[in-house]
Image (cartoon, rainbow, N blue to C red):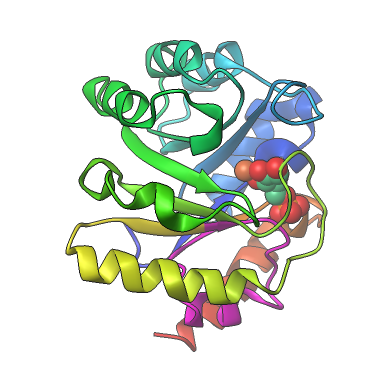
């Protein structure tokens, strides 16, 4: 895998042509696919579930699928997504009754596990499970919708998360999600992120390769 990972969020893709959209964005240089699962309960929107993940695998997608669960309760969905071919499964700690158990279920199913932090959710949920996470995902918008503006206080939170991860000694990716574009990606990387979700910034343009190349060019100036 690249040092920096670009993860297009298919929330902003054309759902009527989803397989083709995923093929095109991978062809354009994306590293993994970010898959937003919303339940109209934990967040006020409803999207896609395990059947769609399975369909993408059947379509021939071999890239990692990064499943961002915005659902409550969490645990039922974990088994379904493991079975559907997810590679990474992240969930919001306040949506799970038993965070440690949910993380273990994900890893036992052969997937990478992660916790997602809303803009106002403190990082202290990480303290006792640092050895059980492969990914820390900081939301830079409130979850539920694509196309929102990046919340600037996320930069300080990224620095805080980066320090915690580095001090832990574990191999943990630091992902950021919401309002990421070629305009702010370098600044976000400098604050410590290494994995970048971008929905509208990529799928909102006609030439996905041009956007992803522009993002990589910005990232090359960072490390
Ligand atoms: O999880 C979410 C929203 O809840 C995201 O993954 C969005 O899909 C990101 O979209 P953009 O802000 O990049 O348009
Ligand atoms: Fe997401």
Q: Position of residue 140 (x, y in %)?
A: 66, 60
What's the residue at 22%, 22% (across, down)? 108
Location of ligand 2 given as a quarter of the image: top right
- Residue lying furthest left: 169
What's the residue at 55%, 59% (across, down)? 176
* 118 versus 52 height, above or below: below
Q: Position of residue 73 (x, y in %)?
A: 56, 17
Q: Position of residue 210 (x, y in %)?
A: 68, 67
Q: Nearer the viewer, residue 190 or 2?
A: 190
Q: Position of residue 115 (x, y in %)?
A: 44, 43
Q: Nearer the viewer, residue 199 or 19?
A: 199
What's the residue at 61%, 17% (across, down)? 49
* 144 versus 190 height, above or below: above
**Do we see residue 30 in this rendering?**
no
| Image position of 200 (left or right of 55) | right
**Do we see residue 168 in this rendering?**
yes
Report if residue 180 lies within the magenta region. yes
* 126 versus 176 height, above or below: above
Report if residue 193 lies within the magenta region. yes
* 39 versus 177 height, above or below: above
Q: How many marks?
A: 0
In the rendered image, which quarter contains the N terminus?
Answer: bottom left
In the rendered image, which quarter contains the C terminus?
Answer: bottom left
Q: Nearer the viewer, residue 173 or 164?
A: 164
User: What is the span of residues highlighted in magenta in the rendered image?
Assistant: 176-196
Q: Quadrant of residue 207?
A: bottom right
What's the residue at 27%, 20% (across, down)? 109
């Amino acid at each position: 895998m690249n040092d920096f990972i670009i993860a297009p969020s298919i929330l902003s893709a054309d759902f009527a042509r989803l397989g083709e959209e995923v093929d095109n964005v991978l062809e354009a240089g994306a590293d993994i696919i970010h898959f937003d699962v919303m339940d109209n309960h934990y967040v006020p929107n409803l999207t896609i579930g395990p059947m769609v993940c399975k369909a993408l695998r059947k379509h021939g997608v071999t890239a990692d699928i990064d499943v961002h669960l915005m659902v409550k309760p969490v645990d039922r969905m974990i088994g379904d997504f493991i079975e559907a071919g997810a590679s990474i499964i992240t969930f919001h700690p306040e949506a799970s009754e038993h965070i440690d158990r949910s993380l273990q279920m994900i890893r036992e199913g052969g997937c990478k596990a992660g916790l997602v932090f809303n803009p106002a959710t403190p990082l202290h949920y990480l303290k006792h499970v640092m050895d059980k996470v492969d990914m820390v995902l900081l939301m830079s918008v409130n979850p539920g919708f694509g196309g929102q503006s990046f919340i600037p206080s996320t930069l300080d939170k990224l620095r805080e998360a980066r320090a915690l991860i580095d001090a832990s000694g574990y191999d943990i990716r630091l992902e950021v999600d919401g309002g990421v574009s070629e305009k702010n990606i370098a600044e976000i990387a400098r604050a410590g992120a290494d994995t970048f979700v971008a929905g509208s910034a990529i799928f909102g343009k006609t030439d996905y390769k041009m956007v992803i190349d522009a993002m990589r060019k910005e990232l090359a100036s960072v490390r």
